[in-house]
Image (cartoon, rainbow, N blue to C red):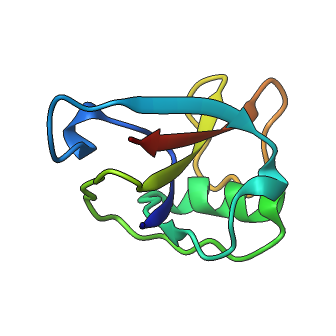
Amino acid sequence: MAKYLGNAFSLQMLTAFPAQVSVEEIEPAEVPADAKSVIGHADTAAVVSSILGREIPVNRVSISLNAGDELYVAQLIGGRLPEGSTTLPEGFSLKFLKVTVR
């Protein structure tokens, strides 16, 4: 079972169909420390790092999710982050979601 931390989920990430996917909202503290970053934008990684209280590296890669894999998504609400952001600007928020492939 692989664990990833990203900022988006796409059906292209699924390796086989039919597939069952569950999505649940979680607290930031529930994001496992061993989840591999697949966040491809430096500003997003910096903001997620500040919220989680640990360094989240930039890692622009494509992933494939198999049954049992988990993707923790830091979903930005409010638009596109202004360039150079290290914290959430006013009017923005992050929702953390756990996507599990069954």
Number of callouts = 0
In the image, is 43 to the left or to the right of 1? right
In the image, is 93 to the left or to the right of 80? right
Residue 59: % across, % down? 41, 70
Q: Quadrant of residue 49?
A: bottom right
The answer to which of 66 and 96 lies nearer the viewer is 66
Residue 27: % across, % down? 81, 44
Q: Quadrant of residue 29?
A: bottom right
The answer to which of 102 and 25 lies nearer the viewer is 102
Which residue appears at 61% of the width and 76% of the height? Answer: 34
Of the 4 image quadrants, the one containing the N terminus is bottom left
Residue 72: % across, % down? 57, 50
Which residue appears at 50% of the width and 67% of the height? Answer: 37
Which residue appears at 69% of the width and 56% of the height? Answer: 48
The answer to which of 60 and 82 lies nearer the viewer is 60
The answer to which of 85 and 17 lies nearer the viewer is 17
In the displayed structure, 47 sits above or below 58; it is above
Of the 4 image quadrants, the one containing the C terminus is top left
Which residue appears at 69% of the width and 77% of the height? Answer: 55
In the displayed structure, 5 sits above or below 90; it is below
In the image, is 9 to the left or to the right of 71? left
Residue 87: % across, % down? 79, 51
In the displayed structure, 44 sits above or below 14; it is below
